[in-house]
Image (cartoon, grey):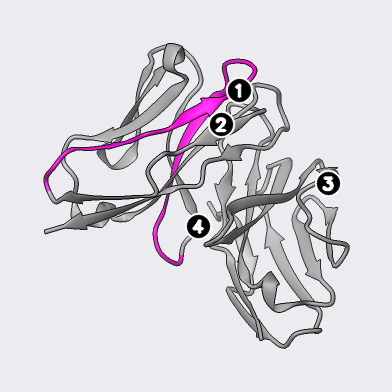
């Protein structure tokens, strides 16, 4: 079975540019999570969706960050404008939404803002 | 407040030696408990999970963890560490309610010396 697919794997861009990260969850999974991982703060939950509806976006750091899930098989995380402090590894994870089922993680997008 | 504490930021063990990684949680009710492993450049992979029943759970790669309700702990163990076990390990807790996010600890980096 295909796992969670994230693209791109690496992104290097200049400050001020718009960045779009993409995620395809595992088919049949109803919950989708976006995380950010940095050395300083570890793994932070940014936002998560249940059945394509955003449930908790309290982890989104600023209005420059936005996330959408237009359908059950696709989600985007957008940063506009990007800043150097946004440099991190961004992970997408999905699960069936049942509490006893684990989250399955993608391989992440390593983002570098120059 | 709900939280997960992994007291050890970095641990070094000799190859062939036993390993125990500590995890303590603070949660309103008995949560679901998970251990994940992250190898460099990769996403998080589920090692094992505890939901109910036997408090000693077995996972992949020879790992096991024991849930101790009285100590609010879920420590990860392995009797004999292999060099390939060098990675970062995350403990996580989740509500038994469907459609909620996990809370992750800050992680413990394991180094294996020869």
Secondary structure under the numbered disc 3 in the rendered image:
loop
Above or below, B12 relative to B1? below
Q: Which residues are magenta?
A: B16-41
Q: On the same chain: label 3 and label 1?
A: no
B84 left or right, relative to B46: left
Front disc: 3 or 2: 2
User: How far is the residue under mark 3 from the one under mark 1?
Assistant: 27 Å
Distance of mark 1 from mark 2, alpha carbons?
A: 8 Å
Marks 4 & 3, CB-CB < 8 Å contact: no
* The N terminus of chain B - image quarter: top right
Q: Specify whether A47 is left or right of A6.
A: right
- Which element is circle 2 on? strand
Disc 4, disc 1: CB below 8 Å?
A: no
Residue drawn at x 67%, y 53% is A25
- Whether discs 4 and 3 lie on one chain: the answer is no
**In the image shown, does A2 or B59 lie closer to the viewer?**
B59
**Which residue is under mark 3?**
A52
Q: Which mark is residue B93?
A: 2
Residue annotated with mark 4? B43
* A32 to B33, vertically: above or below: below
Structural crowding at the residue carrying mark 2, measured as other residues with C-alpha within 10 Å and reported as few (<14), some (14–19) or many (≥20): many
The residue at 72%/66% (across/down) is A22
Q: Nearer the viewer, mark 4 or mark 3?
A: 4
Element type where label 4 sits in the image: loop
Q: Residues within 10 Å of mark 3 (few under 14, many from 20)?
A: some
Q: CA distance from mark 4 to mark 3?
A: 22 Å
Q: Which chain hosts label 3? A: A
Q: Secondary structure at mark 1?
A: loop
Q: Which residue is identified by label 1? A: B27
Tell me which corner region of the image, top left, top right, bottom left or bottom right, holds residue A20. Answer: bottom right
């Amino acid at each position: 079975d295909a796992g969670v697919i994230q693209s791109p794997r690496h992104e290097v861009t200049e400050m001020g540019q718009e960045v779009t990260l993409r995620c395809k969850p595992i088919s049949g999974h109803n919950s989708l999570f976006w995380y950010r991982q940095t050395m300083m703060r570890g793994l932070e939950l940014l936002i998560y969706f249940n059945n394509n509806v955003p449930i908790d976006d309290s982890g989104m750091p600023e209005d420059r960050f936005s996330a959408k899930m237009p359908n059950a098989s696709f989600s985007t995380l957008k940063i506009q404008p990007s800043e150097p402090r946004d440099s991190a590894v961004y992970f997408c994870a999905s699960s069936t939404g049942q509490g006893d089922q684990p989250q399955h993680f993608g391989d992440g997008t390593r983002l570098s803002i120059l | 407040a709900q939280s997960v504490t992994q007291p050890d930021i970095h641990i070094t063990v000799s190859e062939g030696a036993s390993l125990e990684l500590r995890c303590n949680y603070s949660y309103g009710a008995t949560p679901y408990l998970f251990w994940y492993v992250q190898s460099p450049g990769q996403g998080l992979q589920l090692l094992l999970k505890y939901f109910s029943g036997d408090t000693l759970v077995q996972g992949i790669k020879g790992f096991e963890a024991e849930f101790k309700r009285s100590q609010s702990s879920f420590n990860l163990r392995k009797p004999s560490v292999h060099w390939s076990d060098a990675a970062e390990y995350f403990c996580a807790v989740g509500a038994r309610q469907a459609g909620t996010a996990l809370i992750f600890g800050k992680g413990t980096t394991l180094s294996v010396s020869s």
